[in-house]
Image (cartoon, rainbow, N blue to C red):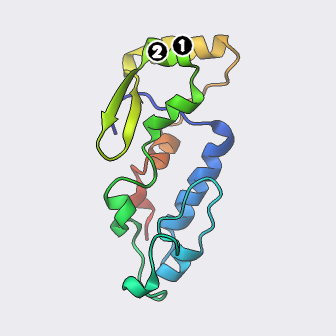
Amino acid sequence: MHDCLAFADAVTAAEEAAEIRALASARTWGEARQVRMTHLWNPAGPDYEDPEDGYADDEPFVITELGAVMDGRWPRMVTTRAFEVLPQDLQDRYGKREFTLHDGDYLEIPLEGEAELVAELRGRGYDVTRDDELINLLDGFSLGSLAG
């Protein structure tokens, strides 16, 4: 979203992507409420959307019309993950902390630094691979294409 590098933990990223796909494939609000999340929170779940507020279980569900998706709260911005997965010294050297009104801080790492940063991470024993499709899904970029 911010045209910069983003990182995710490979151990959980595929499972998080499966949770996003499962919610996006729900056809009704009832199905959406039943999607179990381990890594993410379910923005269609009973803790966030009450059927008494006008979303009956048999009503059609469209993930891109979900309040938390429309206002950018779900899934959380993927560029915030760099604070969790990158060593602090590399965050300081390659990135710049930026602030957004809705999502809080994220680490902006310019694309130009990719090769050098990846080499440094690999030199420290990190297994680094690039998967733009996965990163975009974790960021919610392709949610509309998953629905339906």
Q: Quadrant of residue 118?
A: top right
Q: Is residue 119 above or below residue 44?
A: above
Q: Which residue is mark 2?
A: 92
Q: Amino acid at mark 2?
A: Asp
Q: Say whether residue 12 is left or right of residue 95.
A: right
Q: Position of residue 77 (x, y in %)?
A: 42, 43
Q: Say whether residue 106 is left or right of residue 26.
A: left
Q: Position of residue 69 (x, y in %)?
A: 38, 59
The residue lying at 43 percent from left, 66 percent from top is: 147
Q: Residues within 10 Å of mark 2 (few under 14, many from 20)?
A: few
Contact? badges 2 and 1 (CB < 8 Å):
yes
Q: Is residue 92 above or below residue 16?
A: above
**How many marks are shown on the rendered structure?**
2
Measure how far apart labels 2 and 1 are at the Cα level.
Answer: 5 Å
Tag 1's secondary structure? helix
- Image quarter in which the N terminus is found: top left
Residue 79, disc: none
Q: Quadrant of residue 130?
A: top right
The residue lying at 59 percent from left, 51 percent from top is: 16
**Does residue 21 appear in the picture of this structure?**
yes
Q: Amino acid at mark 1?
A: Asp
Q: Say whether residue 100 is left or right of residue 27.
A: left
- Image quarter in which the C terminus is found: bottom left
Task: Out of 63 and 129, give the one closest to the viewer.
Answer: 63
Q: Is residue 45 above or below residue 52?
A: above
Q: Quadrant of residue 110?
A: top left
Residue 89, disc: 1
The residue lying at 32 percent from left, 34 percent from top is: 99
